[in-house]
Image (tube, rainbow, N blue to C red):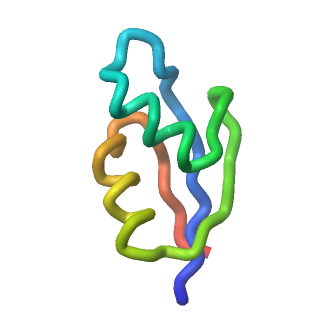
Amino acid sequence: MKKVRITLIKGTVRRLPMHRANVAALGLRKIGQSVEHNLTPSIQGMINAVADMVKVEEI
């Protein structure tokens, strides 16, 4: 499986509750924080929903 590093680059203030929930489900809390996940269809869907708020790098 591919691994990806996801970094939060924009805050969640004044965003839709669904977008806030996706960011939290990815394990991101603060701007600049990074997490690593295996790229599964569910993770890819969460990334697509908040694509403007995160930076994704393939590891």
Q: How many marks?
A: 0
Q: Is residue 31 above or below residue 2?
A: above
Residue located 29% across and 46% down the image: 49
Residue located 51% across and 21% down the image: 11
Q: Is residue 56 above or below residue 18?
A: below
Q: Is residue 1 above or below residue 6?
A: below
Across and down, in percent, residue 55 comes to 48, 48
Q: Nearer the viewer, residue 34 or 44?
A: 44
Left or right of 52 in this view: 8: right
Across and down, in percent, residue 26 comes to 56, 49
Quadrant the N terminus occupies? bottom right
Left or right of 38 in this view: 54: left
Residue 59's quadrant in the figure?
Answer: bottom right
Residue 4's quadrant in the figure?
Answer: bottom right
Across and down, in percent, residue 23 comes to 50, 39
Name the residue furthest top: 14
Across and down, in percent, residue 54 comes to 46, 42
Residue located 31% across and 22% down the image: 16
Q: Is residue 6 above or below residue 30?
A: below
Residue located 34% across and 45% down the image: 51
